[in-house]
Image (tube, rainbow, N blue to C red):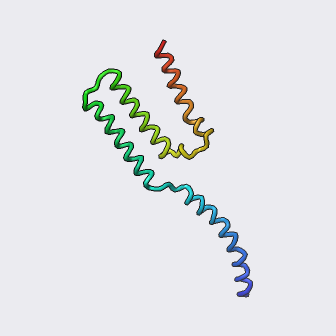
Amino acid sequence: MTNATVHMEGQIQPHVHAAVAPAAAHAKGQQHPIKLYLVVWAWLFVLSTCSYLVDYFGLHGSLRWSLILLFMVLKAGLIVAVFMHMAWERLALAYAILLPPVLVLVFVAIMVLE
């Protein structure tokens, strides 16, 4: 009976390894190095500091608003690319998520120019 048990374990074991190995490799492949997140956090801090400095130096008018909007778009782009994992998505999915807001901004700009 022990021979049958050993034989059965030998048959079951490769299937278990075959099922677990891709899952473990898939989970390991999805992890990003901590350095990437630290660099993104540093860039977000720098961009937020620059946005604060626009108010600190008392810039006014269109220069102020263009700088604030520029820093805002850069921060949003970093967040979407890294923390929402859009940098690693297929191009079609990225277009499906990013293209509509860009088109809305284009249409708003056209209305403002009229």
Given residues 25 and 70, the one toward you in this image is 70
Residue in the picture at 50% in, 44% down: 84
Query: Residue most toward the left?
Result: 57
Place of residue 63 in the rendered image (x, y in percent of width and height, measured from the top left): 34, 24
Residue in the picture at 72% in, 79% down: 8
Give the answer, above or below, for where 35 lies relative to 79.
below
Place of residue 73 in the rendered image (x, y in percent of width and height, measured from the top left): 43, 33
Q: In this image, 61 relative to 81: left or right?
A: left
Give the answer, above or below, for where 64 lies relative to 3.
above
Write down the quadrant of residue 27 in the picture. Answer: bottom right
Q: In this image, 103 relative to 37: left or right?
A: right
Q: In this image, 58 relative to 8: left or right?
A: left
Write down the quadrant of residue 48 in the picture. Answer: top left
Query: Residue most toward the top?
Result: 114
Residue in the picture at 48% in, 12% down: 114
In this rendering, the count of numbered labels is: 0
Give the answer, above or below, for where 63 lies relative to 41.
above
Place of residue 33 in the rendered image (x, y in percent of width and height, measured from the top left): 47, 56
Q: In this image, 16 relative to 27: left or right?
A: right
Place of residue 12 in the rendered image (x, y in percent of width and height, measured from the top left): 70, 74
The quarter in which the N terminus is drawn is bottom right
Give the answer, above or below, for where 10 lies relative to 34.
below
Residue in the picture at 70% in, 83% down: 6
